[in-house]
Image: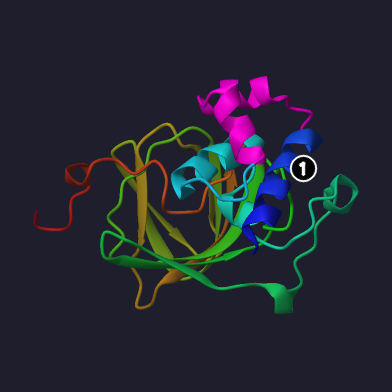
Amino acid sequence: MDERKIIQKIRELRKQKRFTLDDLADLTGFTKGYLSKIENSANLPPLSTLHRIASALGVVLSQILSEENTDPLENQIAFVRKNQRREMQVAIHGTQFKHWPLAHRKIGRNMDPYIIEIPPDNYQVYQHEGEEFYFILEGEIELNYGGESYRLEAGDSVYFDTHIPHSGRSVGEKPAQALTMFYSYKKINREPFTGGILPARNSKRPNE
């Protein structure tokens, strides 16, 4: 996407939220002057800066970088047809995660639904603000929540507050899949598996 269009999109999203530059400065920690310079520049700031701005606007960075429409009337309802579902992958500490976003077209959402594949070697431990819901579609997972271990199989579901340390991994013959809902109190949509990871030594592999 053209850099000038991305900058224009940031301005449009800010105005849709009815945020002034002062409001955005309070939310991001940047100065009003720096934000004004960004909106009037022909060049993009660093990705880390764009990520902070996106979070303050209640969207994920990919929405700012995409060609999708930001018209508020077009974003009151958002469909993702089966043939529009995109498989995405992310590698965290050597573990590969697959996930399929189900509401990425909805701007400013509080909820972030996904179909996710939970690998057997997922030993990441997470802790962050918000809530999560899992409905197991196939396979079996082991959920560790606050130091307690639970088994869930296809048809089971669980809902929990995410400020308690938690982790989950598949324990069957193949990776489990789940319909998952992330909810953020602050409208900070995040990509799954990438936020709120505790230091690696808090997550133990078997025999460690």
Relative side of 116 to 186, left or right = left
Residue under the point 55% across and 50% down: 44
Q: Is residue 96 above or below residue 44?
A: below
Q: Is there any visible trace of residue 188 in the rendered image?
A: no
Residue under the point 65% across and 62% down: 2
Q: Is there any visible trace of residue 158 in the rendered image?
A: yes
Residue under the point 59% across and 56% down: 62
Q: Quadrant of residue 12?
A: top right
- The boundaries of the magenta stretch are 17-40
Give the residue number, with chain letter if any, for mark 1.
12
Give the dominant element type of the magenta stretch: helix, strand or loop.
helix
Residue under the point 41% across and 51% down: 194
Camera-side residue of 55 and 12: 12
Q: Is residue 135 magenta?
A: no
Camera-side residue of 129 and 10: 10
Kindly identify the amino acid type of the residue bearing the numbered disc 1: Glu
- Furthest toward the left, the residue is 208
Relative side of 198 to 134, left or right = left
Q: Quadrant of residue 104?
A: bottom right
- Element on which disc 1 rests: helix
Q: Residues within 10 Å of mark 1 (few under 14, many from 20)?
A: some
Residue 110 image position (x, y, % from top left): 67, 40
Q: Is residue 204 above or below residue 188?
A: below
